[in-house]
Amino acid sequence: MNHGKTCIVEIMCTRELGDPFRRDALSKPVRFLEKYKDYV
């Protein structure tokens, strides 16, 4: 990393892997324990 060389990273993304995780990330968490109900 400290040698000043350029590196290229190619990442292939598909909707099959992206959609389920994205929807979960944007939804509010479900709190089952009463003591954590205020942490929304």
Image (cartoon, rainbow, N blue to C red):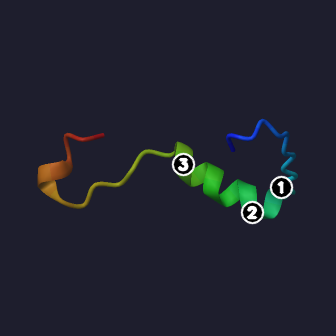
Image coordinates for residue 33, horizontal then vertical, percent: 18, 59
Q: Residue at 24% across / 61% down in the picture?
A: 32
Please state which amino acid type lies under the numbered disc 1.
Cys
For the C terminus, the quadrant is top left
Above or below 6: residue 13: below
Look at mark 1 in the image and give the residue it sits on: 13
Residue 31 falls in image quadrant: bottom left
Sequence order check: which comes first, mark 1 or mark 3? 1
Q: CA distance from mark 2 to mark 1?
A: 7 Å
**Label 2 Cα neighbours within 10 Å, binned few <14 / some 14-19 / many ≥20:** few
- Which residue lies at the image location 84% right of the left edge and 54% below the top edge? 11
Residue at the disc numbered 2: 17
Q: Residues within 10 Å of mark 3 (few under 14, many from 20)?
A: few
Q: Which mark is residue 25?
A: 3
State how far apart marks 1 and 3 are (Cα).
17 Å
Q: If you read the primary sequence from the N terminus, does the residue marked by circle 3 or circle 2 appear first?
A: 2
Q: Is residue 37 above or below residue 4?
A: below
Q: How many marks?
A: 3
